[in-house]
Image: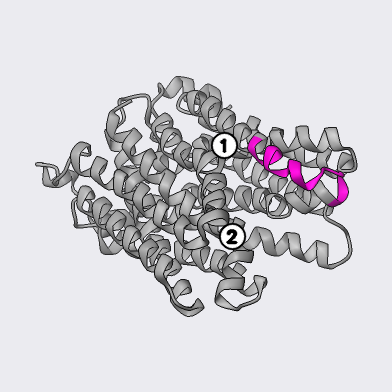
Amino acid sequence: MPLAVYILALSVFSLGTSEFVISGLLPEVAGDLHVSIPTAGLLISGFAIGMLVGAPILAAATLKLPRKVTLTGALAVFIAGNVLAAVAPNYPMLFGARVVTALATAAFWAVGAATAVKLAPAGAHTRALAVMVGGLTVSNIIGVPFGTLIGQHLGWRAAFLVVAALAGIGLVGVLKVVPGGHSADPADRPHLRGELAAFRSGRLWLALATTALVQTGFIAVFSYLTPLLTRVAGVPSGLIPGVLLLFGLGNLVGITLAGRFADARQLGTLYVALAGMILVLASLALFAGSTIAAVALAFGLGLFGMACAPSMNGRVFSLAGAAPTLASSVNVSAFNAGNTIGPWLGGLVIGGGLGYASTAWVGAAVAVGALALAVLSGVADRRSRRTEPVRTEVPTAELADLAA
C-alpha cells in the first residue's frame, strides 16, 4: 500500500479524535461555559449535521481544484477550527468552531477517500479505503481515551490543541507525500456534470441507503451502550473504559479482516458482516442482563459493525465509475444521516419505557432492513450485468458467481 494512503489514515486519526473526544468532556465543557450537559451535547449533533450537509456541497465546490490542494486546505481549516475551539470564550463560539471543523472534516473525507482509491494498486482499492477508515478506528481506541484523559487533567481546551497538533503532523505528511496537481489528461479530470451523472444509477442509491441503514442500526445501540452495560448488565463504571477498549479492538479486527476480503467478495463480505451484526444485536437484547455476555457482545458489535464499512465504501466507488468524488461525499452524508437518526431512534424506545436493552432490538431490526437492501443490490446487479456491469477489480465471471 502506498505511503500516502497511510498519511491519509493518520490525518483521519486526528479528524476522528476531534469528532468524538467531546463526548468524554461534556461535563467539563458544560461547567466551564455555564450550560447544561444536554446543551453541551448539541456540540456532537452540530458536528454530525455539519458533516451531513457539508460533504456534498464542499465536494462540488472544490471539484475543479487539485485533490492535494483540497486536502491541505481542509486540514489547515480543521487546525484553525480546533485552535478556535480551544480559545472559545463562550458556547456560541465553540459551537461555531465545531461547525467549521465539521465542514473541513467532510471535505477531507470525501476527497481523501477518492485519493486513496486513486493511489491504491489494482485489486486493492477497497483495502485502501479500509486502511483510511482504520485511522478512525484507531482514534476510537487511542485518540479519544487519550484526549479525554488530557482534557480531564489539563482542561478540555488542551484536548483541542493536541488534536490541532496531530492534524499539523498530517498536514506536513500530505504536503510531502501525497501527489499534487491535476492529471495531464483532461479526460481524467473531474467534472461536475460527469459526477452528477453517476447518481442516475438506482444501484448507487441502493448502496447509499444501505450505508445509512447500517450506520443507523449501529449507532442506535452504541450511543446508549454505556448505560446498557452499567444499568442492565451490571458492569462497574470503572470497567467501562476497558469494555470500550475491547469494543475498539473489535473495530480494528473487523475492518482489517473485511478489508482483505471485500475487494474480491464485495457483497458477500457485506452479507456476512450484516448477518453477524444482526445475530450480535439480537443476542445482546436477549442476554443484556448477563455481565459476561454483554461484554463479549460489545466486542462482537465492534467487530461486525465495522466489518460492514469496507464493503459499503467499496461498493459506492464501484458504482460511481469515473466520478468518485461526489459519490464519496454523499456516502459521508449517508454515514452521518445514520449518526443523526440512530440516537434519536434509540432515545424513542428508551423514552417509551422499554429500557436500554430495547435499543438492541431497534438496531437488529434496522440491520435486517439493511441486509434486505444489500440482497436487493445483488438482484439488481444480476439484472443489469449485460448492459451496466459493476466496476469491480475481479473478473466478471467471478463476480457473477458472487452475485448468484
Kind of residue indicated by mark 1: Gly
Q: Which residue is mark 1?
A: 378
Relative placement, left or right, of 134 versus 168 is: right
**How many badges with numbers are in the image?**
2
Can residue 90 be seen from the camera position used here?
A: yes
Tell me where the magenta segment starts and ends, as one range.
231-245
The front one of 300 and 214 is 300
Comparing 334 with 50, the one in front is 50
Which secondary structure type mostly characterizes the magenta part of the structure? helix
Q: Earlier in the sequence, mark 2 or mark 1?
A: 2
Answer few, some or many: residues within 10 Å of disc 1's Cα (few below 14, many 20 plus, some between 14 and 19): some
**Going by the image, does 214 lie left or right of 12?**
right
Local secondary structure at mark 2: loop
**Membership of 85 in magenta stretch:** no
Q: Nearer the viewer, mark 2 or mark 1?
A: 2
Q: Nearer the viewer, residue 81 or 148?
A: 148
State the image coordinates of residue 135 (x, y, percent, origin top left): 45, 39
Q: Amino acid at mark 2?
A: Leu
